[in-house]
Every structure is written in structure tokens, then in C-alpha cells.
């Protein structure tokens, strides 16, 4: 069954029950999350309407919005990147209902792996444990000149005050997140090359535009029942079993309530 495109009206009863049943029966759900899971916490996505790319493109004369995550551009002009980081830190975001739903799924023994493209650490804050942060996090940072490592708390004040953090050696400090052209953490390639044995794949709040994370999920979707929940259509919708275009928190709330009606 392929779901129709749902917008404001949400899911019909049949779809809600069908998806809740698949999750109730599953014991090895693999999840990929993207920026869309954190927008209701106040953190903007990249490519969604009014996303960060649009804001940064208007404010800075960038060759392309992606340039804020290109290492050569960052070394010449770190300000747009740090402006994004500053806005993330200033808001002290809390996990959304969707983050909490995923933590609950894991607690229920239903989820085996959560791969997130996000760098905001909200899955950990919600209580999820089996999290693979494939684009790194803001938790630590490193000097690009001498390699010294910093806890982000050490540079947080400088960033919040509007500065660009520098090491004692005067080198530029970069949070340990993966920029375009950089390798992802080794543990990501391990699961990419040898995908986990999943009985359901859940793709949440991602445009599936960024490789290799999207490739990992779409490979798995070729052999596993999959559900993509995203506000906007993606170019890869046809590769997924069920596509639900609606707000994620609303989706998770509906499914959570449905699952609790008939515990497995
Ligand atoms: P993206 O390309 O910006 O796509 C996000 C998708 O989420 C869009 O297609 C939106 O339609 C959808 N979306 C937005 N809000 C909602 C909502 N409330 N309910 C349902 N869907 C929604 O972001 P991707 O994650 O696909 O791209 C990967 C990039 C984004 C990674 O490198 C991340 O590091 C990076 N990113 C992370 C954060 C974060 O950590 N919170 C924020 C912005 C970007």
C-alpha cells in the first residue's frame, strides 16, 4: 500500500492503524532523521521553506548556500557558519514530541538503530541511546591548526558573544561536525557497508538530498518496508513504501496514541 499525499488533514484512520500495526509488530526499526524533526524546537532546517539556506543566502553574498559547510570557505569566512551555530546555542532547544517518541520506541524494544543527520544533540537529550550522529555534533570542537580538542562548553561563551573562537595558537576552531567533502565517522561506514537487519525503516524530516546518509537509507528501503514522513515531497518518494507528507509531531502523536491503544 502506498499512502496518498496528506497535508493539513493528517492521516486517515486506515493509514494510522496500518502504520501503528507495522510499528507494534516490529522489533528492529531503523530510523534516519533529518533537520525536519527539530524545526518545531525552533531550529530551522536547510532546504525547507524559510530554511537556513535562504536566510544565509540573503544575508551573505555566498557562492552557494552550501558554502557555509565547505571547509575552504569556512577557513576564509567562518562568520556565516558561526552565526548559524550561535542561533542554535542561543535558543537552548528542547527535544520535540517526535524526539521523545523515538526514545520511547527504543525503550519499548522496538528500535535497533537511530541514524541522525542532525548536529543538535536533541536525540540524546530526549533519552535515545542507540544514536549514530553521522554528521558529527557540536559537543566537541578542534583547532584546525594544532588539532587541540575542546569541549564545546569551552568555546560556547565566545560564540554567544558574537566572536569566532580561536585556539591559543591562534588557529581557527571548528566544531567536530562533518563538512562537505569530509569523511563521516567510521561507525557510519560500518553500518552503510553492512546494513543492520531491519524489519521496518522510518525516514523522518529529511529531504534525502545529502549523501551518503540518504544512500544508506534508500539502499535499505530497497529490501525493507519503509515509511517516509516529511512535510514536503522529496525526489525519492517513489523508492519508499509509504510516504506521509505531514507535520512530524502530529504524525508521531497520532501513531503513539494508536500504539498505546493496543499495546503489543
Ligand atoms: P533538509 O534538506 O533541510 O530537509 C529537511 C526536510 O524536513 C524538508 O524536506 C522539510 O520538508 C522537512 N520538514 C521541516 N519541518 C518539518 C516538520 N515539522 N514536519 C515534517 N517535515 C518537516 O535537511 P536534511 O536533514 O535532509 O539534510 C541533511 C543536513 C541538514 C544535515 O547535514 C544536517 O546536519 C543539516 N541540518 C541539521 C540541523 C539540526 O541539527 N537540527 C538543522 C539544519 C540542517
Image (cartoon, grey):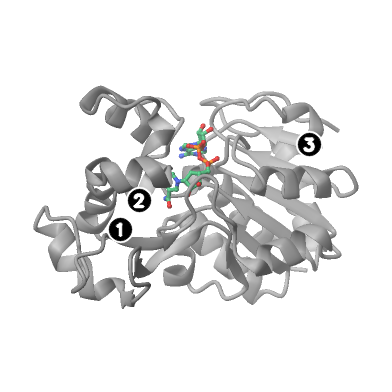
Label disc, if present, on residue 41 of the rendered structure: 2
Res. 186 image quadrant: bottom right
Q: Is mark 2 within 8 Å of ligand 1?
A: yes
Q: Secondary structure at mark 3?
A: loop
Q: Is residue 143 left or right of residue 185?
A: left
Give the image location of residue 77, x and y in percent: 25, 41
The quarter of the rendered structure image containing the N terminus is top right
As drawn, the residue found furthest toward the right would be: 223
| Label pair 1/2, CB-CB below 8 angstroms | yes
Mark 3 residue crowding within 10 angstroms, few (<14) / some (14–19) / many (20+): many
Calculate the distance from the C-alpha at mark 1 to the C-alpha at mark 2.
6 Å
Q: Mark 3 or 2 closer to N-term?
A: 2
Which of 8/81 is in front? 81
Label 3 sits on residue: 240
Label 1 sits on residue: 93
As drawn, the residue found furthest toward the left would be: 161
User: Which residue: 25% across, 74% down?
Assistant: 153
Q: Is residue 155 left or right of residue 214?
A: left
Amino acid at each position: 500500500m502506498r499512502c496518498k499525499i496528506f497535508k493539513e488533514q493528517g492521516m486517515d484512520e486506515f493509514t494510522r492503524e496500518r502504520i501503528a500495526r507495522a510499528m507494534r509488530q516490529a522489533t528492529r526499526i531503523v530510523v534516519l532523521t533529518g533537520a525536519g524533526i527539530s524545526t518545531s524546537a525552533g531550529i530551522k532546517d536547510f532546504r525547507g521553506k524559510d530554511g537556513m539556506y535562504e536566510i544565509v543566502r540573503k544575508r551573505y553574498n555566498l557562492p552557494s548556500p552550501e558554502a557555509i559547510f565547505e571547509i575552504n570557505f569556512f577557513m576564509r569566512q567562518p562568520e556565516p557558519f558561526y552565526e548559524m551555530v550561535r542561533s542554535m546555542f542561543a535558543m537552548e532547544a528542547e527535544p520535540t514530541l517526535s524526539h521523545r517518541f523515538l526514545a520511547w520506541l527504543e525503550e519499548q524494544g522496538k528500535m535497533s538503530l537511530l541514524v541522525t543527520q542532525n548536529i543538535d544533540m536533541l536525540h540524546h537529550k530526549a533519552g535515545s541511546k542507540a544514536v549514530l550522529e553521522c554528521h558529527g555534533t557540536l559537543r566537541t570542537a578542534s583547532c584546525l591548526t594544532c588539532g587541540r580538542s575542546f569541549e564545546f562548553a569551552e568555546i560556547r561563551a565566545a560564540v554567544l558573544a558574537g566572536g569566532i573562537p580561536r585556539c591559543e595558537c591562534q588557529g581557527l576552531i571548528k566544531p567536530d561536525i562533518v563538512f562537505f567533502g569530509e569523511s563521516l565517522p567510521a561507525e557510519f561506514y560500518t553500518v552503510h557497508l553492512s546494513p543492520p537487519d531491519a524489519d521496518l525503516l522510518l525516514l523522518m524530516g529529511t529531504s534525502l538530498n545529502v549523501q551518503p546518509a540518504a544512500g544508506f537509507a534508500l539502499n535499505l528501503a530497497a529490501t525493507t518496508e519503509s515509511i517516509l514522513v516529511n512535510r514536503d515531497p522529496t525526489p525519492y518518494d517513489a523508492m519508499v513504501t509509504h510516504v506521509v507528507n505531514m507535520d512530524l509531531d502530529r504524525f508521531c502523536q497520532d501513531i503513539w496514541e494508536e500504539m498505546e491503544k493496543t499495546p503489543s
